[in-house]
Image: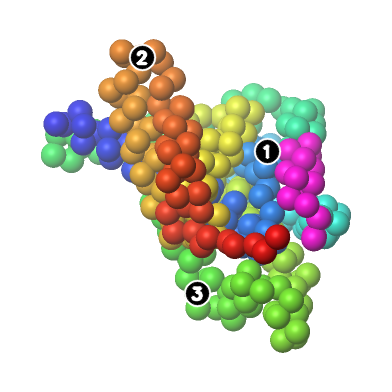
């Protein structure tokens, strides 16, 4: 029983970070009906910018985060201006191919722009675990999960209660009606992509704290994609629920099934869950089914 609880807690903590990353997918999809398959590379670049600000520019932790945030906003603004606007009303496959291609370009260029050493990226916190009822909880995972929960809650409150959030929800529901009501769709689209860039940076830094550094962090984006589909591409609440569930499922799969079936079973657990969800409920747990007349 203690082993089971330890796996559940570990999975839930990882799920909190998954939820923050998945939220970046949902924000973009709700605003522009596009899936950013380059998000994994954004996460890497955000973490590397934070590491550069901290270790090379000696800006301190807060200064490094601000520096990285500004850099990611600039990246997102350029992406929105020169890529997203050209893909509006284009077939979905166009956006998929373009974002995948740009992600590959970023993955190739990033090692040339940043020194690929562990010291460049903030490293995992080294501290004694927190012991609760005989269970060891790593403080770095707990701290990262708490920050992820706070960020996710803040974004949810921003969307629900701020004037900008109301405009963004109106655009997500019906862009043409929002434009007719006087909402500057291009302006708010830029805000969404800028916010996504900041979220990617924060998620990248948190993931480095938990799992270590390296350009393999980009794979987290693909790892989180099943969560977005399971929760519903247009549902923030569904994404959060799915992220926690997949985090726990992955942890349990690693803990109980790696030994009899071979290592790595936990990594394929989200995709097995995705296959089941696509067969039972294609639009996700909380997603809205879309009916198109042909």
Q: In the figure, 231 relative to 106: above or below?
A: below
Q: Dot 1 surroundings within 10 Å: few (below 14), some, or many (20 or more)?
A: many
Marks 3 and 1, the one that precedes in the sequence: 1
- Spot the residue most to the front: 294
Is 92 part of what is drawn in magenta? Answer: yes
Q: Quadrant of the N terminus?
A: top left
Asked whether residue 75 is in view, the answer is no
Q: Disc 2 and disc 1: Cα gap in Å?
A: 31 Å
* Whole-percent x, y for residue 242 in the image: 41, 48
* Helix, strand or loop under label 1: helix
Q: Residue at x 43, y 38 (%)?
A: 276
The residue that disc 3 covers is 160
Q: Disc 3 and disc 2: Cα gap in Å?
A: 45 Å
Q: In the figure, 32 relative to 2: above or below?
A: below
Residue 254 picture quarter: top left
* Helix, strand or loop under label 2: helix
Horizontal side, residue 199 vs residue 143: left or right: right
**Which span of residues is magenta-colored?**
88-102
Marks 3 and 2, the one that precedes in the sequence: 3
The residue that disc 2 covers is 261
Is 109 part of what is drawn in magenta? Answer: no
How many dots with numbers? Answer: 3
Q: Dot 2 surroundings within 10 Å: few (below 14), some, or many (20 or more)?
A: few
Q: Residue at x 70, y 60 (%)?
A: 294
Q: Disc 3 and disc 1: Cα gap in Å?
A: 29 Å
* Helix, strand or loop under label 3: helix
Q: In the figure, 169 relative to 241: above or below?
A: below
Asked whether residue 217 is in view, the answer is yes
| Residue contact at pointers 2 and 1, CB within 8 angstroms | no
Q: Residue at x 66, y 74 (%)?
A: 174
Picture disc at residue 41: 1
Q: In the figure, 8 relative to 201: above or below?
A: above
């Amino acid at each position: 029983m203690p082993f089971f609880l330890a796996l559940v807690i570990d999975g839930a903590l990882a799920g909190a970070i998954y939820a923050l990353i998945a939220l970046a997918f949902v924000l973009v999809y709700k605003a522009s009906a596009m899936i950013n398959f380059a998000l994994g590379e954004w996460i890497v670049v955000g973490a590397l910018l934070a590491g550069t600000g901290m270790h090379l520019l000696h800006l301190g932790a807060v200064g490094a985060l601000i520096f990285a945030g500004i850099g990611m906003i600039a990246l997102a603004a350029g992406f929105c201006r020169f890529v997203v606007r050209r893909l509006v009303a284009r077939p979905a496959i166009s956006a998929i191919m373009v974002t995948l291609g740009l992600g590959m370009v970023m993955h190739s260029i990033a090692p040339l722009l940043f020194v690929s050493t562990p010291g460049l990226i903030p490293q995992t916190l080294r501290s004694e675990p927190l012991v609760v009822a005989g269970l060891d909880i790593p403080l770095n995972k707990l701290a990262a999960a708490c920050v992820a929960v706070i960020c996710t809650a803040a974004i949810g409150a921003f969307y629900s209660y701020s004037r900008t959030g109301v405009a963004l929800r109106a655009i997500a529901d019906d862009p043409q009606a929002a434009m007719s009501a006087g909402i500057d769709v291009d302006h708010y689209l830029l805000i969404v992509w800028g916010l996504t860039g900041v979220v990617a940076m924060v998620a990248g830094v948190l993931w480095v704290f938990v799992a270590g550094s390296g350009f393999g962090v980009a794979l987290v984006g693909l790892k989180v994609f099943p969560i977005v589909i399971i929760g519903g591409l247009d549902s923030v609440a569904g994404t959060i629920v799915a992220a926690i569930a997949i985090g726990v499922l992955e942890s349990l799969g690693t803990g109980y099934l790696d030994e009899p079936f071979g290592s790595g079973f936990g990594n394929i657990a989200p995709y097995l869950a995705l296959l089941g969800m696509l067969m039972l409920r294609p639009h996700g747990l909380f997603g809205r089914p879309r009916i198109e007349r042909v």
